[in-house]
């Protein structure tokens, strides 16, 4: 339990005679990282050079190659987070709890990027950073709910209490998503006559479609790489807390033993 | 051991009775939260330049935003009293069913919120010159929204309220989650007051769904929450 040398799936780097330094990298993450880097370079090439501007949206279509992949990655990670939260509550598994945290945190980051790129796209295309349409509003609420999840997860306390609290918040957020989406959709439909802004979903085909699919794959690779590293880092942090507690207990026991000897000697 | 629904309801009435007796003796909701709510009504008046026609138009939204602010205070208070004097440990050892404790908390929150909402309704009639209409829709919306708000408050309250370093977390947890309630209840009120278009009863049904989701969640997870918070 207090093995500092490795985290699940990671490798240890050894110096002769010394305690192996913990590492969050492994052969798998190095390969995944390399694929992500090469993929990112390819996406940049396709997005800025090879693919053509859109007939309606012009050059601003290029933001789509970041915006759509990040929102896909975000929603996928949040579904996985909900799953791991359910497993955590059911099995009280530290692995599931740490995976839930890693996917939740990376998913929140992806959602933040989605909101930022969406705002920039809206500003360029329609001169408005924000529109109160169903999808953006749902995404903004989801973002706030997951900030709440991360805040609860980072509260201190015994690991068991922390995992129960945060998994309940994660599950509650996930259960609420359909209600939020439906209510915001109804609300949006009341405003349809009043908005002049178009939908943020142009028709893509040909090179645009290829670039978008490539960008989706790269976004998923980057997300997986981030989740693996974040999981391992969080695992190490938890082990450090456990080791710290054991070390403090051992130090207190030694003190007590030392005092007992002194008292016995003085007698 | 199988617990019967009647026993859960009995436990709920014990907890609700306890909370309401504490409130009746301490009068925190009456002495502190009601004046706060009236202050917010006045502040909105100042913020919107006392333009009565505008205030009348936005009454539905302002009403429910004020209810949400009051909810945060009341939920914090409800769970702060459990944190003191080892009451939470006593609850764990009491043999009361966690679902019963949760439902009791919901009932007590509903009772306190209804008192606040009735007072708030009188305040908006007076200060914003609003004429009430659509009584059935208003009443149904109020009850459905209040149950949903109370259920969410009773679920997130133990997580965030009443403990050191956690109090400031409650608004962040509760308010985004209550956004659909605010949306639906404000729209339903607009329809009831003759200012909105669309199906007011559709919105009231949405509030019912929200209430059911959170009541179900609360009943399901309050056991582990009580043990581990």
Image (cartoon, grey):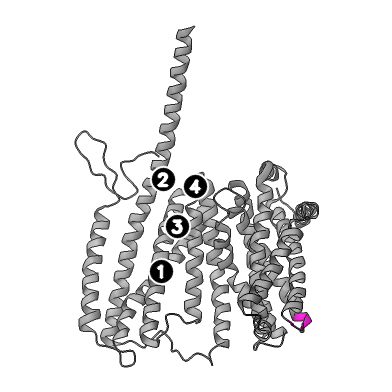
Prevailing secondary structure of the magenta residues: loop
Q: Which residue is drawn at the image coordinates 62% and 79% (left, top)?
A: B48
Q: Secondary structure at mark 3?
A: helix
Q: Is residue A199 left or right of residue B128?
A: left
Q: Which residue is drawn at the image coordinates 68% and 87% (left, top)?
A: B195
Q: Is residue B15 left or right of residue B185?
A: right
Magenta span of residues: B129-137
The residue that disc 2 covers is A238
Give the alpha-carbon distance from disc 1 to disc 3, as whole Å.
18 Å
Give whichever of A79, B114 is nearer the camera: B114
Q: Is residue B222 left or right of residue A44?
A: right
Please determine if labels 1 and 3 lie on a single subunit.
yes
**Which circle, 1 or 2, is nearer the viewer?**
1
Q: Which residue is drawn at the image coordinates 35% and 39% (left, top)?
A: A3
Q: Is residue A85 above or below residue A19?
A: below
Is residue B103 a member of the stretch shown in magenta?
A: no
Q: Chain of mark 3?
A: A
Give the alpha-carbon distance from disc 3 to disc 4, as whole Å.
17 Å
Q: Label 1: few (<14), some or many (≥20) within 10 Å?
A: some
The residue that disc 3 covers is A100
The residue that disc 1 covers is A112
Label drawn at residue A156 = 4
Give the alpha-carbon distance from disc 1 to disc 2, as whole Å.
26 Å
Give the alpha-carbon distance from disc 2 to disc 4, as whole Å.
11 Å
Q: Secondary structure at mark 4?
A: loop
Residue B219 appearing in the image: no
Residue B49 appearing in the image: yes
Residue that extends furthest to the top in the rendered view of this protein:
A267
Q: Is residue A20 above or below residue B138?
A: above
Q: Chain of mark 4?
A: A
Q: Earlier in the sequence, mark 1 or mark 2?
A: 1
């Amino acid at each position: 339990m207090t093995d500092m040398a490795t985290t699940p799936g990671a490798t240890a780097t050894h110096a002769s005679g010394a305690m192996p330094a913990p590492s969050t990298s492994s052969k798998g993450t190095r390969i995944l990282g390399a694929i992500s880097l090469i993929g990112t370079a390819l996406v940049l090439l396709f997005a800025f050079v090879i693919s053509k501007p859109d007939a309606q949206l012009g050059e601003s279509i290029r933001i789509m190659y970041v915006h759509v992949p990040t929102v896909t990655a975000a929603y996928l990670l949040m579904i996985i987070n909900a799953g791991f939260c359910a497993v955590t509550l059911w099995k009280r598994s530290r692995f599931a709890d740490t995976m839930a945290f890693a996917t939740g945190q990376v998913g929140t980051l992806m959602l933040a990027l989605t909101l930022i790129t969406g705002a920039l796209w809206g500003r360029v295309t329609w001169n408005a950073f924000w529109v109160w349409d169903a999808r953006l509003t749902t995404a903004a609420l989801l973002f706030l709910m997951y900030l709440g999840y991360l805040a609860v997860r980072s509260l201190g306390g015994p690991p068991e209490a922390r995992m129960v609290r945060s998994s309940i918040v994660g599950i509650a957020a996930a259960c609420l998503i359909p209600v939020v989406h439906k209510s915001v959709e109804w609300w949006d439909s009341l405003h349809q006559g009043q908005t002049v802004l178009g939908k943020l979903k142009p028709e893509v085909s040909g090179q645009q479609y290829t670039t978008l699919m490539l960008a989706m794959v790269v976004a998923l690779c980057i997300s997986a790489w981030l989740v693996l590293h974040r999981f391992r880092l969080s695992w190490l942090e938890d082990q450090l807390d456990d080791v710290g507690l054991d070390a403090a207990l051992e130090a207190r026991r030694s003190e007590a033993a030392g005092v007992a000897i002194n008292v016995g000697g003085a007698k | 051991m199988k617990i019967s629904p009647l026993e859960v309801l009995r436990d709920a009435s014990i907890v609700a009775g306890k909370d309401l007796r504490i409130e009746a003796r301490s009068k925190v909701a009456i002495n502190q939260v009601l004046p706060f709510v009236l202050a917010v009504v006045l502040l909105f008046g100042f913020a919107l330049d006392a333009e009565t026609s505008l205030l009348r138009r936005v009454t539905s939204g302002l009403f429910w935003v004020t209810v949400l602010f009051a909810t945060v205070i009341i939920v914090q208070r409800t769970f702060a009293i459990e944190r003191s004097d080892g009451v939470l440990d006593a609850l764990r050892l009491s043999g009361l069913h966690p679902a019963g404790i949760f439902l009791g908390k919901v009932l007590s929150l509903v009772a306190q919120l209804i008192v606040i909402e009735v007072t708030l309704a009188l305040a908006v009639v007076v200060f914003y010159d609003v004429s009430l209409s659509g009584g059935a829709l208003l009443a149904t919306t109020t009850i459905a929204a209040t149950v949903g708000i109370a259920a969410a408050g009773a679920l997130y309250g133990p997580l965030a309220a009443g403990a050191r370093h956690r109090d400031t977390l409650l608004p962040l947890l509760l308010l985004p989650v209550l956004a659909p309630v605010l949306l639906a209840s404000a729209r339903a009120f607009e329809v009831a007051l003759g200012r909105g278009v669309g199906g007011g009863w559709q919105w009231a049904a949405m509030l019912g769904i929200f209430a059911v989701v959170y009541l179900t969640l609360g009943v399901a997870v309050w056991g582990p929450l009580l043990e581990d918070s």
